[in-house]
Image (spheres, rainbow, N blue to C red):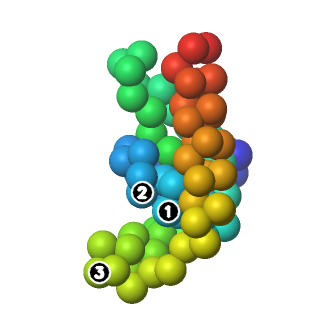
Amino acid sequence: MKNQSMKNVFKVKDFYSAIILRSFNIPILRLEKENNRFVTFIFDSPSTICEQILSDFWDRKLKVEPRRFIENINEIKTRVHETLDS
């Protein structure tokens, strides 16, 4: 992962933004713990793609399959708890 180009990495701290990105199949590289209470989500995707997805979300242009959205909420909650508990 250290050889990963920074232009192909996108970081976000917002839980729901992370869920939206996962709902569009953007892979999570890792979660980084901050202050034992918060995490930063590190995605394996160019920032331009992630920013466009999030922009479309805020502009109400996206359609997300509800089951996928719920599954991603559960996946990310589990990963956050695992990261904070470690």
Q: Amino acid at mark 3?
A: Asp
As helix, strand or loop, the secondary structure at mark 2 comes to helix
Q: Work out whether mark 2 precedes mark 3 in sequence or the reverse, and give the earlier one.
A: 2
The residue at 38%/21% (across/down) is: 37
Q: Position of residue 64 (x, y in %)?
A: 55, 73
Q: Where, quadrant-wise, is the C terminus in this rendering?
A: top right
As helix, strand or loop, the secondary structure at mark 1 comes to helix
Question: Which residue is identified by label 1?
Answer: 20
Q: Work out whether mark 3 precedes mark 1 in sequence or the reverse, and give the earlier one.
A: 1
Q: Amino acid at mark 1?
A: Ile
As helix, strand or loop, the secondary structure at mark 3 comes to loop
Residue 6 visible in image: no
Outermost bottom residue: 61
Q: Position of residue 79 (x, y in %)?
A: 62, 33
Out of 2 and 16, give the one closest to the viewer: 16
Q: Residues within 10 Å of mark 1 (few under 14, many from 20)?
A: many
Q: Amino acid at mark 2?
A: Ser
Q: Residues within 10 Å of mark 3 (few under 14, many from 20)?
A: few
> Above or below — where is 6 with respect to 65?
above
Horizontal placement of 10 versus 68: left or right? left
Question: Which residue is identified by label 2?
Answer: 17
| Residue 59, label in figure | 3
Q: CA distance from mark 3 to mark 1?
A: 13 Å
The residue at 34%/80% (across/down) is: 60
